[in-house]
Image (cartoon, helix red, strand yellow):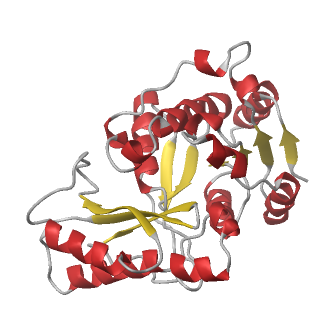
């Protein structure tokens, strides 16, 4: 039976008890409204650790639009049932008051998110990555896991978290490839808000990414040409493009690279009926499947 905890002190005590028994802990941070993508992270964690903790906390610090926070889907009881069914050992429901007692939100010391927060999501959502880093740091401090698991769909976030963990000295960050629906749409809690027509439109994100990757595989390496292809694939697709661009995944820059690329990550963000979706794909790799669930891959902290 899964343990359901709601206070940092009790969650910390549970984790400390596991560690004193010589057991390794895997942490899967989530904001709830769990889907198969989240569950695949938990399954991976169960394979690689003795005990697994999933956190569920809709973090207000990472929302720069209050309406977005208010509309974020919630299903706590269903989430616990799903986690219990696959064998997760503990679920931790955090709150801002519990993480930072006696502090008003505006008094909370925010964690500097580092250079990987520059550009793209950092520009589109001011303060977002500081909010992410602040709460992820607290989760690490409370649980002190051996490993933590994130999805590659939030690619820039995974870089921010990896950098944070490197500075803290723990945990190992395991980044798992994007989990996709059969039509190719990246799984997201926000997908719940899409109607059937919007869902069909949303598939254009993964289609555009695959088209751009096909151009790479055909030999195209010019950053500006590849970015143009990405934009063209999204144009007239019934979505409002926020950004469609490329980055060198190993040398992150605020601005898009120019000229010849050796490595490339294509990244897109778009609004569909007021719902903001993101997706990305590594161009210089054929590891990721075009649709459905994909196998996970590890990026360890060095």
Residue 49, above or below 259:
above
Comparing 31 with 52, the one in front is 31
Point out residue 215 in the picture as x, y percentages from the top left corner. Answer: 22, 83
User: Would you identify the image quadrant in which residue 87 lies?
Assistant: bottom right
Q: Residue at x 37, y 41 (%)?
A: 117
Residue lying furthest right in this view?
1
Point out residue 93 in the picture as x, y percentages from the top left corner. Answer: 78, 40
- Residue 254 vs residue 235: left or right? left
- Residue 73 vs residue 123: left or right? right
Residue lying furthest left in this view?
259
Residue 98, above or below 32:
above
Point out residue 165 in the picture as x, y percentages from the top left corner. Answer: 46, 36
Comparing 207 with 67, the one in front is 67
User: Would you identify the image quadrant in which residue 298 lies?
Assistant: bottom left
Q: Is residue 275 visible?
A: yes
Residue 52, above or below 262:
above
Comparing 180 with 293, the one in front is 180
- Residue 235 vs residue 152: left or right? left
The C terminus lies in quadrant: top left
Q: Residue at x 30, y 72 (%)?
A: 231
């Amino acid at each position: 039976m899964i343990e359901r905890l709601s206070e940092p002190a009790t969650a910390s005590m549970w984790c400390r008890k596991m560690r004193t028994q010589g057991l390794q802990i895997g942490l899967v941070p989530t904001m709830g409204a769990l889907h198969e993508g989240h569950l695949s992270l938990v399954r991976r964690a169960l394979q690689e650790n003795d005990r697994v903790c999933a956190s569920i906390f809709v973090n207000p610090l990472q929302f720069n639009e209050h309406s977005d926070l208010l509309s974020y889907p919630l299903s706590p009881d269903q989430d616990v049932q799903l986690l219990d069914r696959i064998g997760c050992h503990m679920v931790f429901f955090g709150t801002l008051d519990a993480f930072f007692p006696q502090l008003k939100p505006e008094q909370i010391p925010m964690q500097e998110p580092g250079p990987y927060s520059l550009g793209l999501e950092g520009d589109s959502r001011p303060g977002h990555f500081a909010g992410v880093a602040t709460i992820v740091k607290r989760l690490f401090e409370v649980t002190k896991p051996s490993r933590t698991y994130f999805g590659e769909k939030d690619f820039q976030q995974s870089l921010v978290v990896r950098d944070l963990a490197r500075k803290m000295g723990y945990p190992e960050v395991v980044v798992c490839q994007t989990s996709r629906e059969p039509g190719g749409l990246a799984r997201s809690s926000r997908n719940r808000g899409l109607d059937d027509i919007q869902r069909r439109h949303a598939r254009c994100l993964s289609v555009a990414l695959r088209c751009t990757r096909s151009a790479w595989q055909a030999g195209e390496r010019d950053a500006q040409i590849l970015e143009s292809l990405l934009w063209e694939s999204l144009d007239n697709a019934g979505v409002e493009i926020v950004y469609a661009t490329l980055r060198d995944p190993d040398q992150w820059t605020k601005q898009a690279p120019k000229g010849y690329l050796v490595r490339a990550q294509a990244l897109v963000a778009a609004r569909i009926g007021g719902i903001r979706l993101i997706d990305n794909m590594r161009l210089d790799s054929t590891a990721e499947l075009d649709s459905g669930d994909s196998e996970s891959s590890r990026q360890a902290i060095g």
